[in-house]
Image (cartoon, coloured by chain):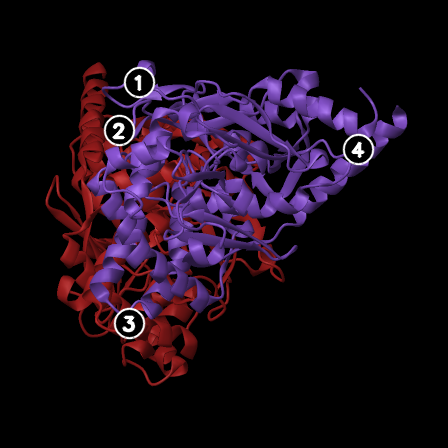
Chain colours: A purple, B red
Amino acid sequence: MNDVVEAVEGANAEALARMLAGDPVLVDVVGAGEAIPALGEKVIGHAGPPVAWREMCGPMRGAVAGIAVFEGWARDLADAEQRAAAGDFTFRPNHDFDAVGPMTGMTTRSQPLLVVENRAFGNRAYCTINEGLGKVMRFGGNDGEVLARLAWLRTRLGPALGAALRDQGGIPLKGLVARGLTMGDEMHQRNVGCTGLLLRALAPALARTCPDREALAEILAFIAGNDQFFLNVAMVMGKAIMDPVRNIDGASVVTAMCRNGTDFAIRVSGTGDDWFTAPVEMPEGLYFPGFTAADANPDMGDSTIVETVGLGGFAMAAAPAVAGFVGAGSASEAALTTRAMSEITVGHNPEWTIPALDYLGVPSGIDIRRVLETGLAPTINTGIAHREPGIGQVGAGVVRAPMACFADAARALGHRLGVS
Amino acid sequence: MNDVVEAVEGANAEALARMLAGDPVLVDVVGAGEAIPALGEKVIGHAGPPVAWREMCGPMRGAVAGIAVFEGWARDLADAEQRAAAGDFTFRPNHDFDAVGPMTGMTTRSQPLLVVENRAFGNRAYCTINEGLGKVMRFGGNDGEVLARLAWLRTRLGPALGAALRDQGGIPLKGLVARGLTMGDEMHQRNVGCTGLLLRALAPALARTCPDREALAEILAFIAGNDQFFLNVAMVMGKAIMDPVRNIDGASVVTAMCRNGTDFAIRVSGTGDDWFTAPVEMPEGLYFPGFTAADANPDMGDSTIVETVGLGGFAMAAAPAVAGFVGAGSASEAALTTRAMSEITVGHNPEWTIPALDYLGVPSGIDIRRVLETGLAPTINTGIAHREPGIGQVGAGVVRAPMACFADAARALGHRLGVS
């Protein structure tokens, strides 16, 4: 038995070492069909573990209908819903394609995708570009305004960002995120610092490569007008860092957490690409004026990759302003969440530190054994979508990963290790 | 005697009300000679209270020689020093011209000046544009590289910023600074958040108004490459806010603090434009590699206007990362400085709040009576220049305002009020 514990500890040390060695660089923006050939006609990538149309929540259905119209696979939203019910579309988790997507996480072949390369391991990961706040597709929005914005991302913003990134040879993200942690960001519900740092890094190359002054002004204004622009970059960075941590024999470290609005799921390094799922929970949070908890959809999105890599709720102490926004207690108590998450991780990240905790690194490498021993489930900072399709974001809050995922994963890992 | 106390309290309440009512907007960049006609041939504005050439410290002399060459009033640095010694130049405090300048604070007629308008009161204030870090004129640098950068600010950056600001109708600063306080800035030794926010606000208008793509890229890269770019904006904002607080009968609130490298000086609302001076102190701080306290010049610059308005050392709790940089104790102790400064101010600013202190406003309105009662001199976060001309910045630290200024000011105010 001690041998097994030692093997797990050794495997977890390797898992943490790979996480900390990650060198994520935002290198390009490319068309999804080019980056991911499997994203063909009528194939729709979505957030979370696998889910069928009949099990999908309202905003996920709304987004599916919207993206089908956007891709030209349906005449209108009603037609799209009929086709979806008739089995016309193939639904696949984004994680199948080295990709992640926020909230509903729609990923289809004509959308532009951010590309992050983990230069320490050579792998690449992908994510769509953040659309902005309010009525947007990731929160289930699907009307003409939402589709027009997606079209602008496809024809204008995506190609311009790609050209700028190629021109400057990419933007290393590890140091940028380190700075963001000193600027009150936790990279999930607060990205105002990193969005500014990213714009500072991008703007000169955008100016050099974008030939049209009006288009350039529009692009700069779009990025500057969206404090959450960096969220999708943080997500694809998280995916690029965590993928090389997969498939370490015996490791009890979580390599992905995600939700599709129906189920929550985790992957653990020592159990490969199996998903351990449980019904997703409702966030506890604060609502925008005019909305209440009765409007809220259960938790959703691949954005929990941010917590998986030690940011988001795990870095709450860096972002006291978030604690109030997500309803996680007073700002002065933000440190408590980070301290609690330190109890369920293998270690701390010495390059991503929090000044207010005298430069303690963010808690990194969620160990499913510690989650079960302490009863402390990972704390996730999240946006809240309206439960009906077509409406959008109604609030923000905190949600806990369901304990059942961790218990199931521990059983499966134990089985692989020959213990029960 | 109680009547006098009541009168002072009432006057101080009015002083704080004017501070909080201030509505500073960055509206333009204009040539100094145009904004300040008194800045004529061979007139040199400098930081701090009045100072003669023979009393000037090394970096101030270095900057004077450099700016005289830059303006074409001397052939070279040696010629400039001879002319200065011969009385060829007129030296005037920047504060005489509604202006402020960091460190040596050289302000002369051909330089471009940031213009902040306080829209609540209609007054304007001026400050040069931040040159960047290291060997720069504000730290006494004066060689060809320093002068070439000043020439680029004059011909390229200044006009472009002015055009962008006029195009967009100015950038309101009160809310921007409020956001900066949630991003780890205290606006004196840390401006990384506000610099990003300013670039986000400026970039679209710059793209619209700057016809030359290479010049635009160069301008964006210059701003993006200087985390302290916002410092001069914070300073001119502070000057614009504090000027309407001057000349309130009986008010014991400080309206300006500044230093010329030889003397420290304060102005108090109830004693008009008199300067109360004392020998300036040495900062206690941390030095860049290769330098020590033996290289340090005494404290210098008009940048203490930032503390006068409740930021800088007064907002240390917002910026735990600064505490370490300036050697003011551990990051987790940053709140102590803000708590201490709360003991010497009339009130707090409800619009400039600090998340980590559960949204306590920054301590605002330094009351010379409380300084003397508590023995707590204002804490100032500052850069440290090399004591020899021509070298530049060697470190950063914390310095206290000399108590003698406050004692002298209190005597003068008492005399005006008929008490002793």
Q: CA distance from mark 1 to mark 2?
A: 10 Å
Q: CA distance from mark 4 to mark 1?
A: 44 Å
Residue at which label 4 appears: A9
Residue type (three-letter) at the residue carrying disc 4? Glu
- Give the distance between the C-alpha atoms of the residues marked 4 and 3, in whole angstroms: 55 Å
Badge 1 marks a residue whose secondary structure is: helix
Are dots 1 and 2 on a single chain? yes
The chain ID associated with circle 1 is: A
Q: Quadrant of the N terminus of chain A?
A: top right
- Identify residue for label 1: A295
Mark 4 chain = A
- Image coordinates of residue B389 in percent, x first then y, are 46, 69
Q: Nearer the viewer, mark 2 or mark 3?
A: 2
Q: CA distance from mark 1 to mark 3?
A: 48 Å
Dividing the picture into quadrants, the one containing residue B96 is bottom left
Q: Which residue is mark 2?
A: A391
Q: Earlier in the sequence, mark 4 or mark 1?
A: 4
Query: Picture coordinates of residue A5 (x, y %)?
Result: 83, 27
